[in-house]
Each structure stands twice: as structure tokens, then as C-alpha cells.
Image: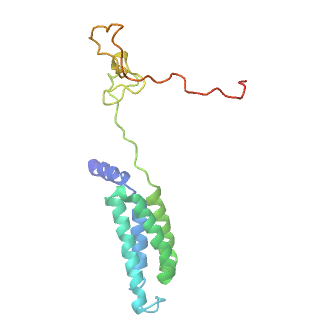
Amino acid sequence: MLLIRRRWRQWRRGRPFWGGLAAIIAGAEICAIPLAPLKVMLQQGIAGIPSVLMGAVMILMGLAAWFAPQYRSLAGIVTVMVAAAALVMSNLGGFLVGTLIGIVGGGLIFAWQPLPSTDETPPDAPHGASPHGAAPPGDAQPTDVPPPTGAPPAGAPPTGASSRSTAPTAPTNLRKPSPLKEI
């Protein structure tokens, strides 16, 4: 039981779960109004079709946020836009409830960020080492630095004064002196 609960928590935290749930609830609410009895509906007949379509799109965006979290930005923006459009086109957006839940859900989907990786550093690794065994940047050893371009290889004999490189050399100071005095 504990394993199932841990996996559920891990799955839920790896995606915009609450935003997707809000989008699905809002879409279901917007879809349900045109299917309600005649006395509840504000628009009937062909005018109820946009309500069902907008609700279906919101449900689809909520499911996309759950099962394809890499598309969370698109799903969040589309959910907010459809929820706002439902206010005008679909029985006041499910009597304002569907629109408000949809806007909040779309905002939650759009704002969600994945958790950073929680790789553990091995206990025998030196302080500051990364979990994969490589040294962090800035801790490079002199042997790790490649030789400058055009320099002879490490084991090559020294060259005489008569052999000159034909490569042009760049000036060392390209900065112009500032007309302002330094304080």
C-alpha cells in the first residue's frame, strides 16, 4: 500500500496535476450545462454546440497537462483562452463557475515547473563533486586545460628561431583609453 501511495505521489508531482484537474472539472461543467433540462439552459439547439466543443477542448487540455507535461505552456494558454471565450459563447461560461475554474486551472498549468533533479552525491565523493563523478566547472586541473591554438604538442622538440609561424597574431590590447578619468 505504501509503494502505491509513493508512486501516486511521484506521478502527481511530476506534472501539473491540480491545474489539469481544475481544467477537466471546468470543461465537464461547461459541457454539462447544454445537456441539462430546458429550464436550466440559457441557449438551446445549435447554440449549445460551442458549449460542448469548448468543454471538450478544456477536458483535452487538462488531460494533455497530465499525460504530456512538456506541452504545459500550450495547454495552459489554450485553457485560459477557451475559458474566457466560454463566458460569451457558452451560457455565461457554465454560469461563471466553469469560466473561473478554467482560468484558475489554466493559470496553474501554465505556471507549473518541474522539480529539479534530486540526484544524490555519493558519500565518498570529494566536497563539491557532482553526483556523476565529474569535477564541477572551475575545478579544472592544469592537465585538463587544452594547449593554446598553434602551440606545439607536449612531446614535440623545440623549434629553432628560423622557423616562424605564418599565422597572424592578434593585438593584445584592443581597448581604447577612456576619455573619462578614473576615480
x, y percentage for residue 143? Answer: 33, 16
Q: Quadrant of residue 146?
A: top left
Where's the C terminus, which quadrant?
Answer: top right
Residue 72 falls in image quadrant: bottom left
Return the residue nearer the eye: 49 or 138. Answer: 138
Residue 11: image x %, image y %? 32, 53
The type of colouring in the image is rainbow
Q: Which residue is drawn at 36% across and 7% down?
A: 161
Give how far across and how far down residue 90 sits, in percent.
46, 82
Instruction: Count up the numbered dots.
Output: 0
Q: Can residue 32 be seen in this view?
A: no
Figure quadrant of residue 23: bottom left
Image x and y of residue 58, in percent: 40, 71
In the image shown, does 144 or 138 lie closer to the viewer?
A: 144
Q: Where 77 sits versus 43, above or below?
A: above
| Residue at screen point 34% across, 17% down | 151
- Residue at position x 40%, y 64% in the image: 21
Q: On screen, 182 above or below 117?
A: above
Q: In this view, does 166 lie above or below 101?
A: above
Left or right: where does residue 95 sit relative to residue 114?
right
Q: Can residue 106 be seen in this view?
A: yes
Q: In terms of depth relative to the viewer, which is nearer, 117 or 180?
A: 180
